[in-house]
Image (cartoon, coloured by chain):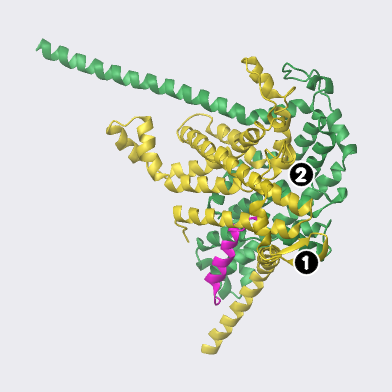
Amino acid sequence: MSTIVSMTNSGATDAVRAKRRRVVTKTAGLGLVHIVLILGAIFMVLPFVWMLLTSFKDRSEVFTYSIQWLPSRINLDGYREVWSEIPFARMYLNSFIVAISVTLCQLVTSALAGYAFARLDFPGRDVVFMIYLSAMMIPHQATVIPTFLLVRKFNMVNRYSSLILPFAAGPFGAFLLRQFFMGMPRSLEEAAIIDGCSRFGVLRSVVLPLCKPALVTLGLFQFMFSWNDFMWPLIVTNKMSMRTLQVGLALLRAEVSTEWPMLMAATVMATVPILVAFLAAQRQFIESIAFTGLKY
Amino acid sequence: MNTCSARLHSEERKTALIALLPSLVIFALFTVYPIIYSLYLSLFDCSLLGGPRTFVGLGNYAKMLASADFRVSMANTVKYAVGTVPIGAALSMFVAVLLNQKIRGRGFYRVAYFMPVVTSMVAVAIVWTWMFDPYYGLFNALLERIGINGPAWLADPRWSLPAVIILGIWKNLGYNMVIFLAGLQDVPVEYYESAEIDGAGGWQKFRYVTMPLMRGSIGFVLIMSTIKSFQVFGQVYVMTGGGPMNSTMVLVYYIYRQAFEFYRSGYASAVAWFLFAVILVLTMLQKRFLKVEN
């Protein structure tokens, strides 16, 4: 009897001990996971922090052999000087005009094309769609020379149109919205059509209000792409007043090379709009990128 | 009745045509025409500034293959791909697996790792140039604290490409992580539970449950990052201009210089078509990895 009790007892304590051990290793493991993740996060965020700290520094504080993390005082000279070094305000404006125009054009053309591919019946629809879709694997860099020649022929160099038109429509947006439209029930549209609504009327007042998340996703993605684009604006503009922010940054870097506080100030200002947009809508941003998993 | 439905039908076609017109015009002008025209241009010896064109057949392609500069830029591009793709994929998979559990601060980590993805390459390349500065840069100062005499990074032909590679990995990590996280969410929890009952440890679970089920995402990330690594341009333009001693000269930067600095539009078109062919092959490979869902 007593042996049985002691056996079950020791069995129970063993189980408890094993469980406790598992809990201990689990919390220790979790702590380790956090340490690894935090170290990684520091590495990811450090360049942004260093950018911000340097932008407030004095020139003399930048050229030190030992690390000086914090500026001795908030020095805004860099932020002030940029505007006289390059037409920074104009470049800012250019970037905004181009990115917003590209985004709006994309939303309109993609909604129209996506709707046609999803809902309208016409001969060769699926073939046209497949051809359009396969264009996604043509890299922009491979078509840049003839596109430049074309833009020059149309006298569009140094004009907004050359920065906007080539990106005013694209297969990715049409594809994304088509997928979204196809997942919607047809019954709502049919009701509106019976009420005498035209197809475009249906698209505008029935379909689009229901797919705001998809439009936000596409819009954010396009804005980011356009705001950050560098190669095409570099090629298709040569007047300072028509350069975009990214080109301006690269030229500033070539011009003042080691004026780090000023360079970092300019970089901070050029990065803020996209970072603010990202932090405000980070869920949609990350989802839109996850959706590009469907690109190509 | 019949004529009525026929009229409805033709109306629908008209609507479809109007709806597709803007997209198709843009597509024809800025994609179809340029890709065909660049193939045509690649057969000529011609200048971007105009002037006479001489037909040279495949001469530009022959010249390309014989050019030492082209070979260097191709080799550097391959080195860049080999340097960024496997390490980048492994690191982002590691982070994704760690983040794919119920831990505190998941949202914070996700944002931190994703920040480099949304910022422009030009902006971060300038910041990294500053951090890579041989004398006053943050990296060498940090290295010195642990007793390492850091290299001259971008000024040293042996270290310039590795420096560009480190930036490439950092910039892309968040993107791959998001793709992997989406894939990991599709792995049923029961699989892990039954593996645990069978006594599988962490690594074994990853090796025999996660890896096989993630084949699609892994294939996608590997091929996508390879394609991206063939399109590297901004960071090279900002950080090194292809130097020192051509050590960071990559394919797209080579095309850019040939076309827009030396105005050799025919020759540059041949190289551009070569790039297109490489990316086409890589995309085909990817299609075999992933069944494209309609």
Please tell me in which quadrant of the rendered image residue B35 appears.
bottom right
Q: Residue furthest left?
A: A1
Residue B275 lies left or right of residue A51; in this view the side is: left
Q: Residue at x 83, y 20 (%)?
A: A60
User: Is residue B189 rendered magenta in the image?
Assistant: no
In the depicted view, which residue is nearer to us: A102 or B173? B173
In the image, the chain rendered in yellow is B
Image location of residue B102, percent across then percent down: 45, 32
Dots 2 and 1 on the same chain: no
Q: Residues within 10 Å of mark 1 (few under 14, many from 20)?
A: few
> Is residue A72 positioned above or below A197 on the image?
above
Magenta segment, which residues? A122-140
What secondary structure predominates along the stretch shown in magenta? helix
In the image, the chain rendered in green is A
* Secondary structure type for disc 2: helix
User: Is residue A123 rendered magenta in the image?
Assistant: yes
The quadrant in which the C terminus of chain A is found is bottom right
Q: Amino acid at mark 1?
A: Arg
The label nearer to you, 2 versus 1, is: 1
The quadrant in which the N terminus of chain A is found is top left
Q: Residue at x 87, y 41 (%)?
A: A86
Residue A129 seen: yes
Q: Amino acid at mark 2?
A: Gln
Residue A190 seen: no
Disc 2 from disc 1: Cα separation: 34 Å
Q: Chain of mark 1?
A: B
* Residue at the spot of label 2: A246
* Secondary structure type for disc 1: strand
* Residue at the spot of label 1: B53
Residue A154 lies left or right of residue A116; in this view the side is: right
Label total for image: 2
Q: Residues within 10 Å of mark 2 (few under 14, many from 20)?
A: many
